[in-house]
Image (cartoon, rainbow, N blue to C red):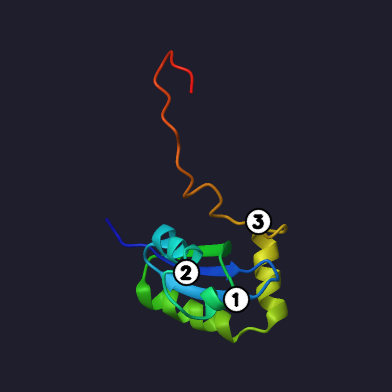
Amino acid sequence: MPKIYYVYILSSQRRVLYIGMTSNLEQRVFQHKTHAFAGFTAKYNVTNLVYFERHGAVLTAIRREKEMKAWRREEKNELIESANPKWRDLSYGWYQRHRYQPEGKAV
């Protein structure tokens, strides 16, 4: 099975942006949300996944990440708003635990 690489954009509530690349989007976003590593995203609380795209080759993903990082702020905003006009957190619901309720028993 071919590996997939993701280029993603995270945003804070104040719309501070971070662009990154990973092969495991769910795990990487979780690391940002839990501030697993000190750095820019932890310092500015940049935790909302507002955009991502998939690539089948690592070099293509790296090239795209560098391209997007070089863009002006307005271009980044336009890209986000083209796919996610309300800047919703696309990872909402990924990490919530589900409570198992056996059949016929009330919680």
Instruction: Measure the alpha-carbon separation of dots 2 and 1.
Output: 10 Å
Callout 1 environment at 10 Å: few (<14), some (14 to 19), or many (20+)? some
Around disc 2, counting alpha carbons within 10 Å, would you say few (fewer than 14), some (14 to 19), or many (20 or more)? some
Which one is in front in this view, the residue at disc 2 or the one at disc 3? Answer: 2
Q: Name the residue under label 3.
A: 88
Residue 11 figure quarter: bottom right
Residue ranking furthest to the front = 107
42 left or right of 5? right
Q: Nearer the viewer, residue 104 or 47?
A: 104
Q: Residue type at mark 1?
A: Tyr
* Image coords of residue 49 (percent x, y): 56, 62
Q: Which residue is drawn at 48% across and 80% down?
A: 39
Q: Which is in the foreground here, disc 1 or disc 3?
A: 1
Instruction: Pinpoint residue 26: horizontal percent, then vertical percent.
Output: 43, 58
Residue 44: numbered disc: 1
Give the labeled residue for mark 2.
35
